[in-house]
Amino acid sequence: MNEVGLAVVGCGTIGRIRAELARDYPGVKWLGLCDIRKDAVEKLADDCNADFYTTDFNELIRRPEVTAVIIATDENAHVEPTLCAIEQGHSLFIEKPLATRAKESQMLIDAIEDAGIDCVMGYTNRFRRRFLAVKERLTTGQIGHVHSVVTRAFMNKMVPIATIQKTNDRANLTPMVVSGTHSLDMSMWLMEGKNPVSVYAKSVENVLTQYGTKDSTFGIFTMDDGTIWSMNISWALPEVWPGSVYGLEIGIVGTEGVIDIEDTHRDLILASNIAQGAGYTSRDYAPPHARHVDFLGSYPAGDIQGGQFWGPMRDETITWFSRLCNNQQTPHATGKDGHRNLMLTMAMDLSAKEGKEIILPEKLSDMF
Ligand SMILES: NC(=O)c1ccc[n+]([C@@H]2O[C@H](COP(=O)([O-])OP(=O)(O)OC[C@H]3O[C@@H](n4cnc5c(N)ncnc54)[C@H](O)[C@@H]3O)[C@@H](O)[C@H]2O)c1
């Protein structure tokens, strides 16, 4: 069993969940933390009894104890700490998106591959039981040859408002790049072996325009075997919508059968005169309206019970530790998947901007 010295860069919502899980995993022998917000890193270091903490990621990643790094910084702040970790030859777990610019993403994936680094990415839905069950049925051919796929993601606008407010660099913080990437990754994983050759998409701007982003993007991909795939997201649902973060539906039609996935959480509803928690908060953001109806389980990462975090993000994080310690095969998205996902989400935005179908080049970053 390999021993892990773990560096967590970014001690916000997600860095906290992963660091607390690391502290409980016997194979993680050393835990170091970094955040540019001194109060955030100090608090988390105290809460999980970290071995080291700093506000400078260079200092953390270059420590001799470190063997693996989690990058859980803001969307626009993944590139520099990732490059530092690659330089040191550490295993990597990077939150989506890999980067927010095409050339930077290509540069990172080239560096990861040149250095032979084992790199996975946080596409947490892959660890929801229902999707693992579907994946197995598709892999073993239970619905024949898949030819038509439709994906619909609906999101509460709490996430985009909280995310966009953290930065003025908003040009690429679109519904597809930030959040649609989760359902795009899932759909591509379920269609493994098919490669998109073209995409035509349209976007609409409305209530989220004041925050510097779009409301919705809908598109149609054509795959190299002729499969058509409709990929749609709106992240502009009102704060009082009972789904606190993500509701997903995917329909997959094959020559011998169909799989219809309902992941909208309408099977577990709480309604109460007592206002429920915010549903989603991040740093300074708190939703302006009280929420009295809640689809329980609609925070895709999981839920807290008894002070502990349960659900797909727990499985995803612990399974990564098993991958590091025992070289276990795991269903994580790889860095390469993450690069492809960013290129495809950006291709939808490009098609919507140019108002035409985009023929996808073999090297996807050549589009930009
Ligand atoms: N896997 C999933 O399901 C999932 C869910 C939500 C968010 N995410 C992704 O995780 C990442 C973090 O999201 P979050 O919700 O935790 O955000 P957050 O704002 O709560 O945390 C980000 C933290 O990074 C810190 N930071 C920024 N730049 C830094 C730097 N250069 N060095 C050190 N620290 C730095 C910030 O101060 C902040 O504390 C984002 O990329 C987001 O898209 C993934």
Image (tube, helix red, strand yellow):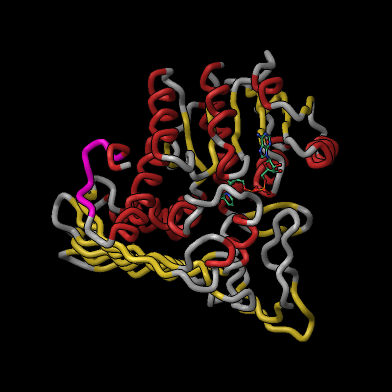
Quarter of the picture holding the C terminus:
top left
Res 269 visible: yes
Above or below, comparing residue 186 to residue 243 in the picture: above
| Image coordinates for residue 210, horizontal then vertical, percent | 58, 67
Q: Is residue 293 magenta?
A: no
Farthest residue, direction bottom: 273
The reply to whether residue 263 is in sight is no
Q: Position of residue 343 (x, y in %)?
A: 36, 44
State left or right for residue 229 relative to residue 269.
Answer: left
Viewer-nearest residue: 322 or 103: 103
Horizontal side, residue 38 vs residue 175: left or right: right
Kindly identify the residue that appears in the image at 23 percent across and 53 percent down: 358
Total numbered circles: 0
| Residue 317 relative to residue 288: left or right | left
* 361 magenta-colored: yes
Front residue of 118/206: it is 206
Q: Position of residue 206 (x, y in %)?
A: 49, 73
Q: Nearer the viewer, residue 233 or 118?
A: 233
- Residue at 78% in and 37% down: 41
Instruction: Write down the quadrant of residue 103 in the picture.
Output: top left
Q: Residue at x 72, y 24 (%)?
A: 30
Q: Quadrant of ligand 1?
A: top right
Magenta stretch bounds: 358-364
Q: Is residue 246 above or below residue 56?
A: below
Give the percent coordinates (x, y) of residue 49. 82, 33
Left or right relative to 121: residue 140? left
Residue drawn at point x = 69 percent, y = 16 percent: 63
- Classify 62 as above or below 354: above
Q: Quadrant of residue 253?
A: bottom left
